[in-house]
Amino acid sequence: MIRPEHVEALLGSDADDATLIVTAGSLVVVPASALDSERYRGALEIISRHDLLTRLGTGVPSRRDLEETAARLDTAVTQLGA
């Protein structure tokens, strides 16, 4: 479900408060302020860009960093049953 490309999309988002979410079975990156909208109400928040950067601890993650992070996030989401 969560692939390195999703992690890259979150890191590359223009929104200062970008967040990776699952909504209607799809992964999307949205500004956190959009989570209160009707469109995203009930969406599962996976991780914010701020939290992702804190976890990565580097400004320029390697491909392996992206793959490992995506795998960890995917496992967490799978365990939640999303």
Image: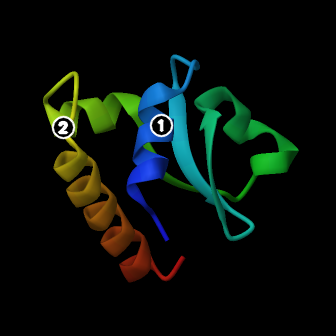
Q: Which residue is mark 2?
A: 56
Q: Which residue corresponds to the image point at 75% horizontal and 67% vertical from the top-left?
A: 24
The x, y position of residue 54, in whole percent, is 21, 31
Q: Look at 49% across and 83% down and name the residue there.
A: 81
Helix, strand, or loop for circle 2? helix
> Looking at the image, is mark 1 or mark 2 earlier in the sequence?
1
The one nearer the camera, 42 or 2, is 2
**Quarter of the rendering containing residue 50:** top left
Q: Amino acid at mark 1?
A: Leu
As shown in the figure, which amino acid type bears the numbered disc 2? Answer: Leu
Circle 2 packing at 10 Å, graded few (<14), some (14-19), many (20+), is some
Task: Report, in whole angstroms, how far the alpha carbon at label 1 lies from the one at label 2.
Answer: 13 Å
- The residue depicted at 72 percent of the width and 33 percent of the height is 34
Secondary structure of the residue carrying numbered label 1: helix
Kindly indicate the quadrant of the structure image that contains residue 37: top right
| Position of residue 32 measured from the top left corner of the image (x, y, whole percent) | 60, 32
> Which residue has dot 1 on it?
10
Spot occupied by residue 63 in the image (x, y as percentages of width and height): 24, 46
* Closest to the observer, 48 or 2: 2
